[in-house]
Image (tube, rainbow, N blue to C red):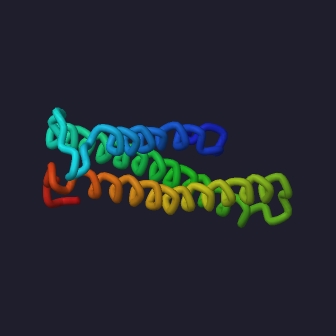
Amino acid sequence: EALPGGDGELLRVMRTIDDRIVHELNTTIPTASFVGKIDASQTCKELYQSLMDAHTSRERIIKNCIAQTSSVVKTLREEREKAQDDVALLKQLRKEQTKLKLMQSELNVEEVVNDRSWKVFNERCRIHYKPPKSQ
């Protein structure tokens, strides 16, 4: 299971990548009024790639967890059909359903984190680097 203990620790750590990139964007990419010695277009290109990679891998992990947990929930539901009065089974099902809801809400958190990062990226890099059309 990629989300240890279901507490999103791995995601939290992976999201610090965005914090680092946002910090780097804010500190190394010159504003239009202060174009210094650094190669802004190269830096922007590298940071763009880092953001894309970070977002893709986080989304993949979350979606894998959702798929795995969904299948556990499905199995438990089927077992529950056969054993309606199994209290332990019901508790397990509830626990997995809660976990599933949490993971699904992580996708929303992910969207917020990503939007913030792209907003800073675009503010800082739009004059230095044009990303490929997919973004």
Residue 67, compared with residue 13, is above or below; it is: below
| Residue drawn 25% across the image and 49% down it | 31
Given residues 23 and 67, the one toward you in this image is: 23
- Horizontal side of 127 relative to 2 (left or right) equals left
Given residues 101 and 128, the one toward you in this image is: 128
Residue 56 locus on image (x, y percent)? 34, 48
Q: Residue furthest top?
A: 37
* Rendered image quadrant of residue 44: top left
Residue 125 locus on image (x, y percent)? 22, 51
* Rendered image quadrant of residue 80: bottom right
| Residue drawn 29% across the image and 38% down it | 28
| Residue drawn 64% across the image and 45% down it | 6
Q: How many marks?
A: 0
* Rendered image quadrant of residue 126: bottom left
Given residues 124 and 104, the one toward you in this image is: 124
Residue 113 locus on image (x, y percent)? 46, 55
In the rendered view of the protein, which quadrant contains the N terminus?
top right
Q: Residue furthest front?
A: 33
Residue 63 locus on image (x, y percent)? 45, 53
- Horizontal side of 111 relative to 45 (left or right) equals right
In the rendered view of the protein, which quadrant contains the C terminus?
bottom left
| Residue drawn 21% across the image and 51% down it | 33
